[in-house]
Image: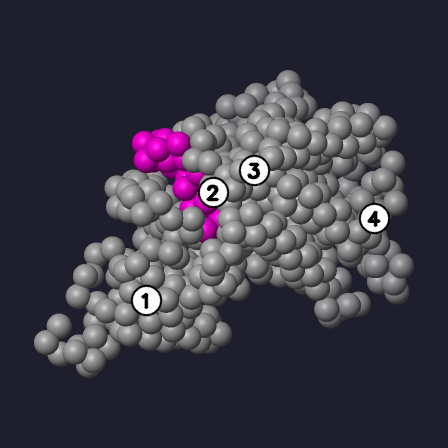
Amino acid sequence: MGRVLCVYEYLYLVSVLDWVVLLGTIGFIVGFGIWKNRFHRDISDYLKAGNSARWWTVGLSVMATQASAITFLSTPGQAYHDGMGFVQFYFGLPIAMVIICLFFIPIYHRLKIYTVYEYLENRFDLNTRTLTALLFLIQRGLAAGITIYAPSIVLSVVLGWNLNMVVIIVGVLVIIYTSIGGTKAVNATQKWQMAIMFLGMFLAFGYIIHSFPDEINFNKALDIAGLSGKLEILDFSFDLENRYTFWTGIIGGTFLALSYFGTDQSQAQRYLSGKSIQHSQMGLIMNGFLKVPMQFFILIVGVMVFLFYQIETAPIHFNPQNIEKLRNSDQAQTLEELESNHLTIQNEIRDILLNPELSKDQNLQNQLIFLEHEEKNKREQAKNLIKSIDSSAEINDKDYVFISFILGNLPKGLIGLLLAVIFCAAMSSTASEINALSATATVDLYKRRIKAKSDQHYLKMSKLFTVFWGIVAIGFASIGNLFENLIQLVNIVGSLFYGAILGVFLLAFFFKPIKSRAAFMAVLLSELMVLLVFYLDIVSYLWLNVMGAGLCIILAHVLQFLISPKT
């Protein structure tokens, strides 16, 4: 149980039943998206779904857009290694939902806009609109590549599939039904995708609990997780370099959520398709109420995987490709000795966990904490060993924890369903992104400058831009590199751009004296300063959202005073 299976051995764990479940699920999603939404009257029907989405469709679509495959691959691994503290990242989300419902949505609906960047021309000028739209296209174009690349690299390593093949399969499937069906197809398929995601995660959670020995029920499992430090949720320290604290979640998380849900077209397009202002608002409030519990549940699944591997011995490193390299190197004997020591520690941990006196005996609890620390040291030694034979190897194995657990322990059929969860999550978020990229490129750049064309011409261009951005996303994914934890990477990319974009929207909403020239220069300068701060690694990335927005607002006032002191 303590050995990582090689990539070829994993292939035999995926049965015919798993393939039927996986391919049947994906085939249904793609087929349904195309068949149900293959006809469009005009560009409004294609980009805004004819404003027909009801509040539950809006809410589920918003959640599915954010819940990418990265969520289901990385979040359990995050909890496995670091516990529940990551949930603090989402504490600001409900606050942001209320603000967007009160101030953003009424203005967007009143103006009957296709993209949120149209509002900036109405408030400032074409240059400000174009600059902000371009920042979005850069940021979201990169993110779309990450959302394809993230599951592709993990699946390719674990299953032994060719990376580019997986990238192309996911990208092409999304391009097909998104380009044909538009926003309606995205909204319709995301309801089914969310249902599949929730079903898969609940079944996986139930299986883990059922697999525990009779001596360990769910309550005792939580007690053990508490002893291991995995249930420490709140951190009130005010450390700017600490990524996940209560304050980064409430302050930085609020600004990030305001930027993402209020000014990112991939999210705005979901509620701009709402049947009315009320349906859009109720959809976002639904997301605000359900998102934190959803992330909490996924993290709990990760903690339960940790407990599962405390009883059923865990591999010393979860990336099978790295372990396979070690086995074929001159460090194979060292690895074998390390795994043997690791197995001994794991057996001692299991004996303590099954001891009925654990909850009462402080010495046993202290011994458990000591052994878990030793087990972590063995993992670090394995990582150092990997680096010793390949200095360029990615030794962070958080993103491989959950997929390794799925393939190595779940029963036939359920493996296929969980693989379908990962593919559905990748497809849902990528579909929203290229749908939004198409809308922004068509409306904010092409249509704004190429006028006097028929509505059917712009409809055709929207479809072509969907295909174009899908190919761009595939291109980014094909040249990507795994960088730390994937769920952190996508948030880091967003934080580099969201602050400045949010700042200009806040200027537009709340600071009427600020005019176009000051706003344009403030966005540009604040974005450059955020990139510089990130390069110098001064603060945690979540604070970049606050910094970017704050700098944009301050610089705009200073520049406005210099341009027009009387104003």
| Location of residue 423 in the rendering, given as x and y in whole percent from the top left corner | 68, 40
Circles 1 and 2 in contact, beta carbons < 8 Å: no
Mark closest to the chain's N terminus, 3 or 1: 3
Circles 3 and 1 in contact, beta carbons < 8 Å: no
Which element carries disc 3, helix, strand or loop?
loop
Residue 510 in sight from this viewpoint: yes
Instruction: Give the image quarter of residue 515.
Output: bottom left
Residue 267 part of the magenta-drawn span: yes
- The residue drawn where x is 60% and y is 50% is 460
Q: Is residue 532 left or right of residue 559?
A: right
CA separation in Å, label 1 and label 2: 24 Å
What residue sits right under mark 3 in the picture? 40
Q: Which mark is residue 125?
A: 1
Image position of 5 with respect to 57: above or below: below
What residue sits right under mark 4 in the picture? 160
Look at discs 3 and 1 and give the one toward the viewer: 3
| Residue span colored magenta | 265-284
Q: Nearer the viewer, residue 219 or 78?
A: 78
Q: Nearer the viewer, residue 483 or 440?
A: 440
CA separation in Å, label 2 and label 4: 43 Å
CA separation in Å, label 3 and label 4: 41 Å
Mark closest to the chain's N terminus, 1 or 4: 1
Q: Is residue 472 left or right of residue 135?
A: right
Residue 144 part of the magenta-drawn span: no
| Location of residue 502 in the rendering, given as x and y in whole percent from the top left corner | 35, 58
Instruction: Give the image quarter of residue 206.
Output: top right
Under mark 3, the amino acid is: His
Circles 3 and 2 in contact, beta carbons < 8 Å: no
CA separation in Å, label 1 and label 4: 52 Å
CA separation in Å, label 3 and label 1: 31 Å
